[in-house]
Amino acid sequence: MKTVEVTYAGLIEVKRGETPKELYSHQNEAIKALNKKNQFPFEGLLVLPTGGGKTLTAVHWLLRNFINNKKKVLWIAHRHELLDQVLETLRLSAYSSLLSNVSEFRYRIISGHPKHDIPVNIEKTDDIIIASKDSLNSGLDHLLKNWVGDLDEVLLVVDEAHHATAKTYRKLINAVKDDLKERSPDKGFKMLGLTATPFRTDESEKSLLKLVFPNDIIFSEHLRNLIAKGILAEPIFENLKTKIEIKKKLTAREIKNIEDFDKLPKDIAEEIAKSYERNNIILNHYINNREKYKPLLIFAIDVIHAIALNKLFTDKKINSDYVVSSVKDLTTGATVSAKENSEKIKKFRNGELEVLINVEMLTEGTDLPNLQTVFLTRPTTSTILMTQMIGRALRGQKAGGTEKAYVVSFIDDWENKINWVNPEKLHFEEDAEFLIKGIPSSNRTARLISIEMIEEFARIMDDSIDTTDSEKPDFLKRIPIGIYHFSILEQSEGYEPNPRPYDVLLYDDSEEAYDNFVNDLKPLFQSIDLQDREILTEAELEELWQTAKQISFPDYQTLLGYRDDDIKNILRFYAQKQIPPAFLAFSERRKCDLSIVARYIYDNSLGGKAEADYIKSLWNDEKSFWQVLFSYNKLYFMKQLAIEIMKITDPEIYGDYVVGTIPNVIPDTVPIEKLTLYEIKEPDILEYRKIKNAVFAKYTDTKGFITCAISGVKTQMRRDFQIDHITPMSQGGLTTLDNLQLLTRKAHVEKTRRENTRR
């Protein structure tokens, strides 16, 4: 029989000697924690930020403790790029210092990608299977019959473990776990989840995570600590709007192809690559910041773009060159070889090149310790690619890198709304502590909100757009009270689903509608027979959306910030996770009332230098939220402040605003239980939600039915009920749990009528 060599399965031979990559102290501490946990079956998490070496740490540990002891490993992820990275790390770590008992081990990579294998070919002799969860789910019988069924012990590694609460992950995990427990209930199943992303969870999601990883976090090291230790550089994100308009109106199909395959249409890619104006913006921005930015790595759109940029840089006597995965020299027609690329990379590493431009290279594995700045001149819809591009600049001083690293994005004006990955937002996901009881850092929440609001601030800056109507409401009313923050594994026409983050802003007038909606998701979904599916059909999504809109958002046209897509995205998230999205409260919102600043300037007749000094002191105050809220863009801040001052000086432009100095009022303080729930909501949204949830919990049975305290009527829909004071506040009743009850809207109206009649 004729045979051919394949790279998706084979034998890795163990080389004698020490592994070339030495682990940092935090990685060694992680291995100690894993060794301790490994004495018994466990299902827990290893949490290290991007650049912290979670894959290398896990590979070192499993090689020494499992492969070296002839135990099997199953590594699952949702993207084929992650699988390739794991194999490369295994290959580069196969040394006798970790593998003293074996001379070789077998691997197999399985995914829907053409260069990978399929589950039917799994063999009993495979020592480590690296696979996508979707492929294994589709060939689950082969995995269990050909491999798991003959084993007494398996280590299951779940990469990107923050997605493991999805239904398809849980199905696969439980299948392997249940099969092993039939033969080896005491030691058969061990599971390690790897993630760089702290879980932003409310209690419902936390309980679901506990089901997947009951041992919780085995070891974690946060981004801030690795930056403080000098292992990672402090990233500084900068955005430069090119003002280049991509005017072509894309079809829905073209947009989907961009988002699924991260590939620009050829004509648009060519338009951007050949734009003399855009390329000169990139060049001049570097020249104007040369001392700060050099040495510079540029991620270009394509080969044409790389060549065009390189010519501009070299024409300005800047030592520059480009590397690409495959290209023919335009002059000679000869193909640029891997050796030539390596020589150019070596020159850049040694300081002979100041600028290196690359296409589809240098995202993983290449060591560039002297890198100071990354220019992102190509947009991407891939979180993995963006993480890799950012990661090129994040090597800290102790790792041979820099103290600070600049990540500069060049942003074009697209006619269509495309879900491009925001590098700062992606990095920001990891720059947070694990949240206790669902309470996040206000600074972090403010940053997420500011990223979502940046379009509004930009529109206000654009003199060609009339934004008077959107500026009319009080400034504080335009600041969200919180945000739903979640990620969905999006189905694509490619080989694997793509994770995409979503944020839904909640304002004072929309919070109750959204709260009822997300808490009524379970009964809402009873009309849909999802079973093991986690993707809604278009018809199912349309039905759920229309029902939710009718029930929870009857006044949607008057709700600030309402968008149909927000409702649909929450529905799609629930279909995958079966939990409501996490709510992040902006508890310091009241400190962001710019109208108070405007009033102070007006009342104190500040002008000229006095006004400038006051504004400067506010902007530079590290305890304030102004820089965070306005995305560190002082122009946005100044423009919005000017609008608030104009509301005082020229009220006829915006409506009936009071002109002149307002007498100072010193408010009283009262115990919070003397306030109505609505009054509590404004100063303390978290306390408001805590009380509200406690009242609903008090009247909800184990099957999820809520009972009216007076009529005894039961339903599962939260929106059918109102919170009522048993002893009215007008008679001295307080807003405390023992004085609050749930009534149907009909019962509440009747109770109010009787009380009014008695009075």
Image: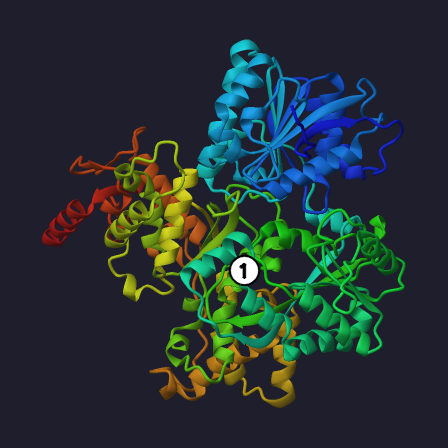
Which of the two residues, 331 or 108, is positioned nearer the viewer here?
331
Callout 1 amino acid? Trp
Which of the two residues, 7 or 528, is positioned nearer the viewer here?
7
Taking the spot 81% from the left edge, 17% from the top edge, the residue there is 101
Expressed as whole percent of the image width and height from the top left, the position of residue 271 reads 58, 72
How has the structure been colored for display? rainbow
Name, please, the residue furthest toward the front: 1
Q: Mark 1 points at which residue?
A: 420
Seen in the picture, residue 83 relative to 444 is either above or below; the reply is above
Question: Could you say whether the residue bearing mark 1 is in a helix, strand or loop?
Answer: loop
Expressed as whole percent of the image width and height from the top left, the position of residue 72 reads 66, 20
Q: Quadrant of residue 349?
A: bottom right
Expressed as whole percent of the image width and height from the top left, the position of residue 294 reads 81, 67
Q: In which quarter of the image is residue 714?
A: top left
Seen in the picture, residue 111 relative to 610 is either above or below; the reply is above
Taking the spot 66% from the left edge, 27% from the top edge, the residue there is 2
Expressed as whole percent of the image width and height from the top left, the position of residue 179 reads 51, 16
Does residue 346 appear anywhere in the picture? yes
Which of the two residues, 734 or 13, is positioned nearer the viewer here?
13
Q: In which quarter of the image is the N terminus?
A: top right
Q: Is residue 582 left or right of residue 326?
A: left
Seen in the picture, residue 719 relative to 295 is either above or below; the reply is above
